[in-house]
Image: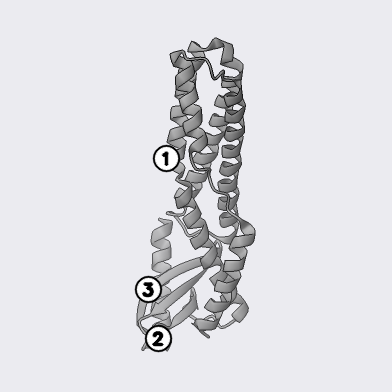
Amino acid sequence: MAVRTHRHLGRDAVERARRRMPELAPDSVEVVELARGKAYVVVRARNADVLVLDRLGRVVRSRQRLAAIGRHICAVQQVGRAFEEARLPQRAEQAEQSIALLGKLMAARPAKATILQGVTGSLVALREALQLAHMQAQRWKEAPPTERTLRRSVLLLNDAAVADRAVVRALRQLGAELRPDSSDPPSDKLRRWVLARLSAPDVPFFMHELAAADQSRYASWFAKISRG
């Protein structure tokens, strides 16, 4: 419903703008919300012009407002790429499989039950953090992220990265507890799993400082190219 509403908002804003500018020929239309209910429509025309409209179809001329819109567009693109790179559903499924495996190995190695429970707890926390971040990403399909919900997205992404580092620390402790001379099947399987998990890529952090520099450059460029 929200996606349809924003599509209609963009269409209506363009139609109203055409009454003032009959020559307007949009190539693409994007709805940007800095705050929920305060939407702007970015129109990229076929002649390469960029025009920003408010919901009534009026041209936005404030350079400060245009820069804020450009900064938000860039930030949404950056966080969207971070969601993709994090591979949230796949990592959550892998955490689930690891939890099941440790449950079986715990029964076969009761002497390691305490440390295996600690690793399992860190994996459960990781799975939950990944699932929360994925649920936030799915909400983007319902409505464009605002500045507030974008901050929430970054927080959840970084929570998942923190939980992933906790798993790594627990695995290193477990690896130190495994005797290298033990060769029974449960120990071998556990050792292989630890090595495979430690060699897997970490969940990436979203680095605010690096992202902010690109956002500022894009904001300046966007305000400069937008017709106002």
Badge 1 vs badge 2, beta-carbon distance below 8 Å = no
Badge 1 vs badge 3, beta-carbon distance below 8 Å = no
Front position in the image: 160 or 27 = 160
For disc 3, the marked residue is 28
Relative horizontal placement of residue 88, taking residue 147 as reference (left or right)? left
Residue 131 location in percent, x, y? 49, 39
Q: Using the rendered image of the protein, determine whether residue 122 is visible from the camera's viewpoint.
A: yes
Is 206 located above or below residue 227 in the figure? above
Label ID, residue 104: none
The earlier-in-sequence mark between 1 and 3 is: 3
The residue lying at 57 percent from left, 15 percent from top is: 113
Label ID, residue 19: 2
Cα gap from disc 2 to disc 3, whole angstroms:
18 Å
The earlier-in-sequence mark between 2 and 3 is: 2
Is 128 located above or below residue 61 in the figure? above
Query: Which circle, 1 or 3, is nearer the viewer?
Result: 1
Residue 155 location in percent, x, y? 60, 49
Cα gap from disc 1 to disc 3, whole angstroms:
33 Å
What is the three-letter code of the residue carrying label 1? Gln
The residue lying at 50 percent from left, 43 percent from top is: 201
Is 107 located above or below residue 131 in the figure? above
Q: Using the rendered image of the protein, determine whether residue 37 is visible from the camera's viewpoint.
A: no
For disc 1, the marked residue is 90
Residue 126: image quadrant is top right
